[in-house]
Image: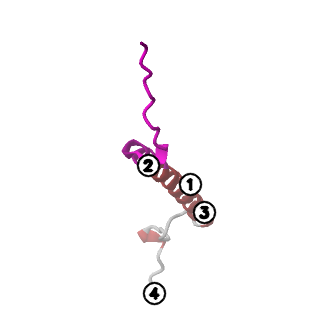
Amino acid sequence: MLTVKLKPKHRPFCFSVKGHVKMLRLVFGLVASVFCIADGALIYRKLLFNPSGPYQKSAVHDKLVL
């Protein structure tokens, strides 16, 4: 007589440990990419509006002595 093997019950992907790890990795990847884009935009904006840097650089001999 043939025996019928029943399939084990399938758990949804998000309820397994491996699923949680993969979803967390995806979320952290998305957050990291958003932060990288924001950082690039802020650096671009800083360089666009203040290309010389935070300080005005001038040589010592350019100062006026009274």
Helix, strand or loop status at disc 1: helix
Q: CA distance from mark 3 to mark 4?
A: 39 Å
Residue range in magenta is 1-26
Q: Nearer the viewer, residue 43 or 12?
A: 12
> In the picture shown, does residue 57 fall above or below 19?
below
Q: CA distance from mark 2 to mark 4?
A: 78 Å
Q: Which residue is mark 2?
A: 15
Mark positioned earlier in the residue sequence (1 or 3): 1
Q: Nearer the viewer, residue 61 or 43?
A: 43
Q: CA distance from mark 1 to mark 4?
A: 50 Å
Between tags 3 and 4, which lies in front?
Answer: 3
Q: Which residue is mark 1?
A: 37
**Percent x, y for residue 21?**
39, 46
Mark positioned earlier in the residue sequence (1 or 4): 1
Mark positioned earlier in the residue sequence (2 or 1): 2
Helix, strand or loop status at disc 2: helix
Residue pictured at 46% horizontal, 42% vertical: 11
Helix, strand or loop status at disc 4: loop
Residue pictured at 42% horizontal, 12% vertical: 1
**Percent x, y for residue 57?**
47, 68
Cβ–Cβ under 8 Å for marks 1 and 4? no
Amino acid beneath label 3: Arg
Between tags 2 and 3, which lies in front?
Answer: 2
**Percent x, y for residue 52?**
54, 63
Between tags 2 and 4, which lies in front?
Answer: 2
Mark positioned earlier in the residue sequence (2 or 3): 2
Residue 5 in the magenta stretch? The answer is yes
Residue pictured at 41% horizontal, 18% vertical: 3
Q: Which residue is mark 3?
A: 45
Mark positioned earlier in the residue sequence (2 or 4): 2
- Other-residue count near label 2 (Cα within 10 Å), few / some / many at <14 / 14–19 / ≥20: few
